[in-house]
Amino acid sequence: MARSIVSAFGAIAALSLIGCSGTKDGDSGSGGSTGTTGPQGCTVTIDATYPEADQADWFYRSAVEAYINEADASATISLSSDAGDVSGSMSTDDDGLRLIFTPDAPLSPSTSYTMNISTCDGEGGASISFMTSELGTPIECDLSGKAYRVDLASARFVKPDPAVASLLFDALEDDILIGVSEQGDAELQMLGALSDGIGGQQNYCYPSIEFPTAAAFEDPFFSVGPADTTLNVADVSVTISQLGISGAFAPDCTYFGGGRLTGELDARVLGPLVGELLGEEDPDAICQLLTTFGVVCEACSSDGAEYCAAIEVVDIAAATTGVALSCVAGEECHPACTTSTCEDPTAGICD
């Protein structure tokens, strides 16, 4: 049971908290310190940008970002190409240290762009040139039956702090697999599952994850949710509030990139499941533990109680496994489960 709980919690963590940075083709990559300073008397510096200068694999649907060392009311961020300025909107985080430019429409794949950052009333800043990846080009294959292994090392936290990832990844003993069971013109039927150990194929002894709605599909981009998604793990039903997942498939369907995940983790829901892992089930105590990582429990969208942590993870990538996923209805109850405890293992096959 202990491994089951650890693996199950790891699955929830991976679906909800996928951290670190990476450079896999199709990802947005990792930001780096630019070392850019302003003119004499200006103390604003640009500490990191997403994308980095000369990056060649930026995701065509991602917002561009810059992190500065101190709030600057005059700071701006914009985007341009050889065709002229890109229309879009600028926003900042509450502390003013993260500048975000969101284009009004997806960028073109395999195209050069320049991110323009201005600080200190235009006296400081930087211009960052980059290129989008091939993602955004229509697919040339049928997605039905394709399954993908999520590359945890390639994803980047936006919310909450990346330090939370290390707490959860240490417990993860299996990969997260995401598959397409059926492709339609405007939607995909998708399925999630755990692998049989890191690098393994699907573990048929764990229930698969059925998303509550079909994924919208605008070739090659997919998006599922946001919707409350219930996982049945270790005999405990766990709901991830307003889970949303999106990304784009490569033209040859060998991987998807630019993945983005949003949702909420509710300490009241996770308590019974993570008690063995964290040594604590009380939701107030779990929220208190999260504060040591700079994460504050906020109002839940469901009822306004302050037990939820907002999740936003970007730059998720996944390579094909070459083996289609099966829908598994129950724990340790499927013909392919080597430790099946069912009198009739076929009961573990989804209708």
Image: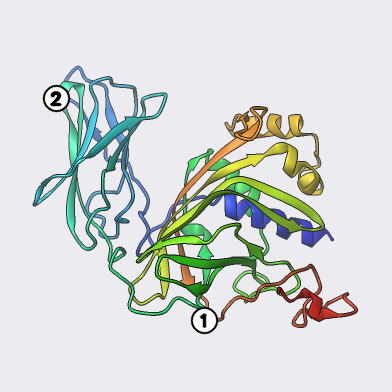
Q: Give the x, y percent position of residue 74.
A: 23, 21
Count of marks placed on residues: 2
Asked whether the beta carbons under mark 2 and mark 1 sit within 8 Å of each other, the answer is no
- Could you say which disc has been placed on residue 243 in the image? none
* Residue 206 visible, this orientation: yes
Specify which label sits upstream in the sequence, 2 or 1: 2
Residue 229 as seen in the image, left or right of residue 109: right
* Residue 177 visible, this orientation: no
* Residue on which the image places disc 1: 322
* Residue on which the image places disc 2: 123
Q: Residues within 10 Å of mark 1 (few under 14, many from 20)?
A: few
Q: Give the x, y percent position of residue 314.
A: 44, 50
Please name whichever residue, 304 or 320, is drawn nearer the observer in this view of the structure.
304
Q: Which colour scheme is used?
A: rainbow
Residue 141 as seen in the image, left or right of residue 90: right
Circle 2 or circle 1, nearest the eye: 1
Q: Which amino acid does label 1 sit on?
A: Gly
Residue at disc 1, secondary structure: loop
Q: Which residue lies at the image location 80% right of the left edge and 53% below the top edge?
A: 236
Please name whichever residue, 294 or 36, is drawn nearer the observer in this view of the structure.
294
Q: Give the x, y percent position of residue 287.
A: 69, 32
Q: What residue type is labelled 2?
A: Glu
Q: Give the x, y percent position of residue 117.
A: 21, 35
Q: Quadrant of the C terminus?
A: bottom right
